[in-house]
Image (cartoon, rainbow, N blue to C red):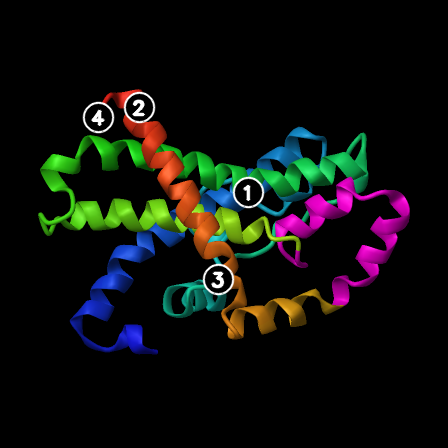
Amino acid sequence: MERMVGLTGIYDIITSLPGIILALSFHEFAHATVSDWLGDRTPRLAGRLTLEPWAHLDLIGTLMLIFFGFGWAKPVPIDPYNYENPRWGLLLVSLAGPLMNLVLGLLLAFPLVLGWGWFGPGTGSILYRLLQSAFFINVALAVFNLLPLPPLDGSKVLSAILPEGQQVIFEQLEAYGPIILMFLLVTNIIGRIIGPMTNGIVEFLITTASLITGVH
């Protein structure tokens, strides 16, 4: 709850909220869109083929993300049996959300790099802070969701690529996934896992944007 104390905490909340809304909305929209492309009309009928934030945001999950650094959106309802190949269709749909966040991360890296001298660190620019927060949130959300723990997207990706016998065993463990995930979050083990991975991707995207734009 320390982030709620003082002006710094309020400023952090204000500057992170647009990035959170952007990241969650595009993440769920990507799931819905790929599922629709693969022949499943379930997301369309549920009104999830939209970038309208209120179609995707879960109030409690969003507040948890703002104040505690982890949270969730409304899961997109899908029916894998509408895909020509349910196993690989589910893999593509599961990857769509994190990949969308990485694409957004790369796109956000360009204004950060190009505006470095105008509104970058040390200028006190709220624009820089908004872009920086949105950039980092998208990368962190992608990395977090690719962890192979139910109910995260990474668990569905792992399940799809496992041999059939191991896939059945893994699916039987899914009921314990949320408990394991909560334990790893509370003990900050996940933070120590995804922190270096997130920082590595952040550096890679900034370096890529710098090379493309010629800004060093």
Instruction: List the residue tagged with mark 2.
Output: 211
- Which numbered dot is residue 187? none
Q: Residue sitting at 44 percent across and 62 percent down?
A: 62
- Measured Cα–Cα span from mark 3 to mark 4: 31 Å
Counting residues from the start of the chain, the first of labels 1 and 4 encountered is: 1
Report which quarter residue 41 is drawn in: top right
Instruction: List the residue tagged with mark 1.
Output: 97
Tell me the element at label 2: helix
Instruction: List the residue tagged with mark 4.
Output: 215
Amino acid at dot 3: Arg
Image coordinates of residue 156 in percent, x first then y, are 70, 48
| Up/down of 124 relative to 84, above or below | below
Residue range in magenta is: 149-175
Q: Is residue 11 magenta?
A: no
Tell me the element at label 4: loop
Instruction: List the residue tagged with mark 3.
Output: 192
Residue occupying the far right of the picture = 165
Q: Residue sitting at 60 percent across and 73 percent down?
A: 183
- Measured Cα–Cα span from mark 1 to mark 4: 29 Å
For the C terminus, the quadrant is top left
Q: Is residue 152 magenta?
A: yes
Counting residues from the start of the chain, the first of labels 1 and 2 encountered is: 1
Tell me the element at label 3: helix
Image coordinates of residue 174 in percent, x first then y, are 75, 62
Q: Nearer the viewer, residue 139 or 81?
A: 139
Question: Which numbered disc, 1 or 3, marks the residue closer to the eye?
Answer: 3
